[in-house]
């Protein structure tokens, strides 16, 4: 055990260290390019999510429920990895609209509604109360465990009060959201490193110092700790959803993620670095829980395994480091949560109450500013008091995880209004208010109040109020048998979402709601000044100056009005109170008192709107509809132009085919007429001149026979392609060795090639494989391609190259000549019947060879295509299925 004096000295020394860090950071924070504005510091500050719950309570939850602890880390990880765009949208909205808190965001989205701001603030305060109690409990129990002291709650509470003083000093010096809390952010980043190092150190000690290795520690794991069918149930998935919602809706988390963000691009780093931090801080949770169950006395508090394990093995320095890590986890939450909630209370509760009194006076003092600062400081102290009261009333009996989950369900009630507001234009103030109120009431009734113990009568819990069983808090309307957390989440969040959607669909929006909806949903396409500047408002510049002084203070207000005057081209005096000036002033005030309060103050000072905002929005809506219609017409026109272009190309092709048809008919007529004429002429000679000499008769008969063969060949080609295209041609398939068929094809046309002076070669080594094809048909295809290459090659030194290779279970045979091949335009029609390329006049043919060859290749399961090189030249490629090896070859 360590002495109380030593613990107090270390704790106070750590707090002093944080003071030094915060003080130094505040002095350096405003410098451009300061390390405090780096994405790493921003990401470490996000670890304020990891409170005493994740430091102590996660180990306790793992010891009690196994892998259920992973949900605490999995929810935020999924949000930062999968919902990065949503986080970026929230940050952009926060910067453009000068959002000061999550209540300010919801209020501003729904027409700057004060009622919504108050409801969100009340929910946040109530939900954060058990969370603060959780931190106080962790400080108290860890202090007792490491010092052995009894009744140490008072000491731990005063340590927390010291942190409250720290928060007041560095978090409430100004009411402007423009002034980032660089000192607080830096202190939280330091605490993030501290708690990570502490937990990892204890984990390393548990695995290698106690168990003797990774395998040894998991050999001691109880079998019931990891039972998938019992772990991954409705409660597990509910906790994942709640943890994901918490990282968006917890006031402290929203404050760090959105309000304290100095550069939207930091989210890129946070999207992978924060999940990595979550992974590292959760890495040793399960091993520490296993070690605690295995080596600590039975009945030990699982929430204190992180401290108890080093103490059990007399590792006092490690236990002290663990205490500081837990202390950091608790205090970082208290600091940021207190700042965020104090801003919400002062802006949305205190400021509206003080509005009438402030506007009835005309003194140029900063009394409103002083009031808001005082209210924030009082709120911080009150929040700690509420947390201590909750801890006392609940007897501190619940585990840390149970207390944290109660808070998670509460803050999750804000999620539908927040996410629906930034994604759905149709979401209304009435829908958001109905959902929030109903969800919060059900959360209080089904989870929060039962967790306090003794607040609700026992007969209510067992039989329901007034004996109405359907109203039992944890079996509402007969939904019994569910885990209390799942039960409360289903009823509260389900009812919230249902009312939010249905009421929004059934109600209409005010003019300002519609404007804010457009600005929020389309924040990446608009800015805060796109809307209100269309509204004409009148006021005396002196009245607005007094208003600014009341809220900002005399010096900041003077600087603001000087800047606005210079922007209008005025050398001195107050700026003209035109629309743009009033809109800018409202945005500046929103950064200090929130959007709802700022809007109310400015509207009171300007005497209301002269031009109906509803009319303006209607005009904007009509304009938007007209723009959408115009865009659709433009898209349709583009589509019609594209269709017309395709029709023009098709028409050109049809004309080309029509010309080719005429050429074909002319050529076929010529091809048929020529042999028929010869046959008829010589037959008539033989019939009319029986005295023809034997030698002449033999020559005439040979001509008749040759022309008959020519005529038959032409008719056979026409019949062949007709049968191939209709599918009636039967082509038996067998194994055809590629090397043999290439050699045979070259031999068949060797004489023709020699006559024309064409050199033929087979490129590279032909693979020893066989194609699944018909040997005669494949040979016919290759002879046709080689013959075309010989006939139509106009190169000075004509050459044909054959190349074969295997690719993905198929064999490819390339027939390429150096004559250039066919053009890209010809490639579209070259395989059409009776079509010839531009080089065809060198040797006229019927134009059936290539169509027949392609049809035969396709009937054998292959293809015949034109392949283009980078230089624009082309060649023909035959692709056929690769035949499987024969049994004898496979056996080799």
Image (tube, rainbow, N blue to C red):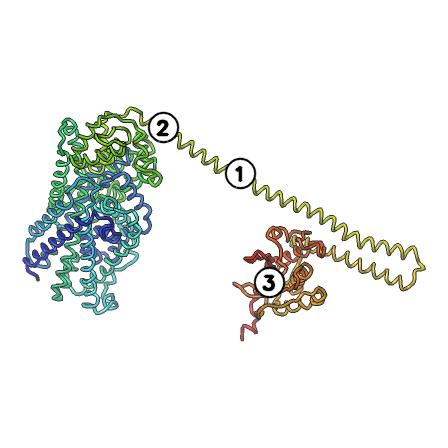
Around disc 2, counting alpha carbons within 10 Å, would you say few (fewer than 14), some (14 to 19), or many (20 or more)?
Answer: some
Give the residue pinned by disc 3.
814
Q: Is residue 365 visible?
A: yes
Q: Quadrant of the N terminus?
A: bottom left
Q: In the image, what residue occupies the spot 30% across and 41% down?
A: 419
Pick the residue in front: 749 or 586.
Answer: 586
Please name the residue shown 93% across and 57% down the image. Answer: 689
Q: How crowded is mark 3: few (under 14 residues within 10 Å), some or many (20 or more)?
A: many
**Label 2 belongs to which residue?**
618
Q: Is residue 313 above or below residue 156?
A: below
Q: Which residue lies under the disc numbered 1?
A: 640
Q: Where is residue 41 in the image (x, y as percent from the top left)?
A: 23, 52
Q: Quick check: marks 1 and 3 in contact, CB under 8 Å?
A: no
Which residue is more in the foreground, 110 or 366?
366
Query: What residue occupies the far front of the structure in this picture?
Result: 571
Residue 258, horizontal then vertical, whole percent? 25, 45
Residue at the (66%, 68%) spot, across then down: 744
Q: Element under label 2?
A: helix
Whether residue 481 is visible to the viewer of this picture, yes or no, is no
The secondary element bearing badge 1 is classed as helix
Q: Quadrant of residue 623?
A: top left
Separation of residues labelled 3 and 2 (CA atoms): 68 Å
User: Which mark sits nearer the N-terminus, 1 or 3?
Assistant: 1
């Amino acid at each position: 055990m360590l002495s109380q004096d030593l613990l107090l000295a270390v704790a106070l020394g750590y707090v002093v260290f944080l003071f030094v860090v915060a003080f130094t950071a505040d002095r350096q924070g405003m410098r451009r390019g300061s390390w405090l504005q780096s994405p790493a510091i921003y990401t470490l500050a996000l670890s304020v999510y990891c409170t005493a719950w994740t430091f102590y309570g996660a180990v306790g939850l793992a010891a009690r429920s196994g892998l259920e602890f992973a949900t605490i880390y999995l929810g935020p990880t999924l949000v930062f990895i999968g919902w990065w765009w949503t986080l970026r949208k929230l940050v952009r909205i926060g910067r453009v609209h000068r959002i000061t808190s999550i209540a300010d965001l919801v209020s501003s989205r729904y027409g700057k509604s004060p009622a919504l701001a108050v409801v969100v603030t009340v929910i946040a305060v109530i939900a954060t109360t058990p969370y603060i109690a959780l931190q106080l409990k962790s400080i108290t129990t860890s202090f007792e465990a490491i010092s052995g002291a009894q009744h140490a709650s008072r000491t731990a509470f005063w340590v927390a009060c010291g942190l409250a003083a720290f928060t007041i000093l560095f978090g409430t010096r100004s009411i402007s959201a423009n002034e980032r809390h660089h000192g607080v952010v830096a202190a939280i980043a330091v605490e993030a490193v501290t708690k990570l190092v502490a937990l990892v150190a204890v984990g390393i000690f548990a695995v290698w110092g106690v168990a003797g290795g990774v395998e040894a520690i998991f050999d001691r794991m109880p079998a019931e700790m990891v039972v998938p069918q019992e772990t991954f149930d409705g409660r597990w998935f509910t906790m994942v959803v709640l943890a994901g919602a918490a990282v968006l809706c917890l006031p402290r988390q929203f404050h760090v993620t959105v309000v304290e963000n100095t550069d939207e691009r930091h989210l890129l780093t946070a999207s992978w670095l924060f999940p990595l931090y979550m992974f590292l801080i959760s890495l040793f949770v399960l091993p520490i829980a296993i070690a605690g169950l295995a080596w600590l006395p039975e009945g030990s508090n699982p929430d204190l395994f992180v401290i108890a394990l080093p103490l059990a093995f007399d590792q006092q320095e490690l236990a002290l480091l663990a205490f500081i890590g837990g202390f950091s986890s608790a205090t970082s939450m208290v600091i940021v949560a207190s700042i965020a909630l104090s801003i919400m209370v002062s802006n949305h509760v205190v400021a509206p109450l003080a509005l009438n009194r402030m506007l009835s006076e005309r003194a140029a003092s900063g009394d409103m500013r002083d009031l808001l600062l005082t209210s924030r400081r009082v709120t911080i102290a009150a929040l700690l008091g509420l947390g201590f009261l909750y801890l006392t009333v609940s007897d501190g009996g619940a585990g840390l995880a149970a207390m944290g989950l109660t808070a998670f369900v509460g803050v999750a009630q804000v999620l539908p209004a927040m996410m629906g507001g930034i994604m759905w234009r149709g979401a209304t103030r009435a829908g958001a208010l109905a959902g929030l109120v109903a969800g919060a009431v059900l959360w209080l009734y089904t989870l929060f109040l039962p967790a306090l113990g003794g607040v609700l009568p026992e007969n209510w819990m067992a039989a329901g109020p007034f004996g109405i069983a359907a109203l039992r808090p944890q079996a509402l309307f007969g939904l019994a048998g569910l885990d209390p957390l799942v039960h409360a989440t289903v009823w509260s969040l389900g009812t919230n979402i249902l009312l939010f959607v249905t009421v929004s669909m059934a109600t209409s929006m005010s003019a300002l709601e519609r404007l804010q909806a457009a600005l929020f949903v389309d924040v990446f396409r608009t800015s805060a000044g796109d809307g209100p500047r269309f509204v004409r408002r009148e006021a005396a510049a002196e009245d607005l100056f007094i208003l600014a002084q009341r809220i900002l203070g005399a010096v900041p207000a003077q600087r603001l009005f000087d800047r606005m005057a210079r922007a209008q081209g005025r050398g001195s005096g107050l700026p003209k109170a035109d629309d743009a000036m009033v809109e800018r002033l409202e945005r500046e005030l929103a950064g200090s008192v929130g959007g709802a309060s700022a809007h109310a103050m400015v509207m009171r000072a300007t005497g209301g709107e002269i031009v109906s905002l509803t009319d303006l929005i209607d005009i904007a809506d009509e304009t938007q509809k007209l723009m959408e219609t115009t865009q659709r017409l433009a898209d349709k026109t583009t589509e019609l132009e594209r269709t017309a272009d395709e029709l023009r190309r098709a028409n050109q092709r049809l004309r080309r085919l029509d010309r080719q048809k005429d050429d074909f008919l002319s050529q076929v007529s010529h091809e048929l007429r020529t042999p028929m004429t010869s046959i008829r002429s010589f037959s008539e000679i033989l019939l009319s001149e029986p005295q023809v000499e034997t030698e002449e008769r033999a020559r005439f008969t040979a001509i008749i026979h040759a022309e008959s063969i020519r005529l038959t060949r032409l008719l056979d080609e026409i019949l062949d392609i007709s049968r191939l295209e209709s599918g009636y041609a039967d082509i038996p398939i067998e194994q055809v060795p590629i090397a043999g068929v290439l050699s045979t094809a070259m031999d068949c046309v060797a004489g023709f090639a020699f006559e024309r002076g064409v050199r033929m070669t087979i490129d590279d080594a032909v693979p020893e494989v066989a194609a699944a094809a018909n040997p005669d048909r494949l040979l016919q295809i290759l002879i046709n391609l080689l013959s075309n290459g010989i006939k139509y090659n106009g190169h000075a030194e004509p050459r044909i190259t054959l190349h074969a290779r295997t690719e993905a279970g198929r064999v490819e045979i390339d027939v390429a000549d150096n004559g250039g091949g066919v053009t890209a335009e010809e490639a579209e029609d070259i395989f059409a019947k009776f079509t010839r390329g531009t080089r065809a006049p060198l040797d006229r043919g019927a134009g059936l060879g290539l169509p027949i060859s392609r049809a035969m290749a396709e009937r054998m399961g292959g293809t015949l295509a034109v392949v283009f090189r980078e230089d624009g030249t082309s060649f023909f490629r035959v692709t056929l299925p690769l035949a499987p090896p024969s049994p004898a070859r496979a056996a080799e």
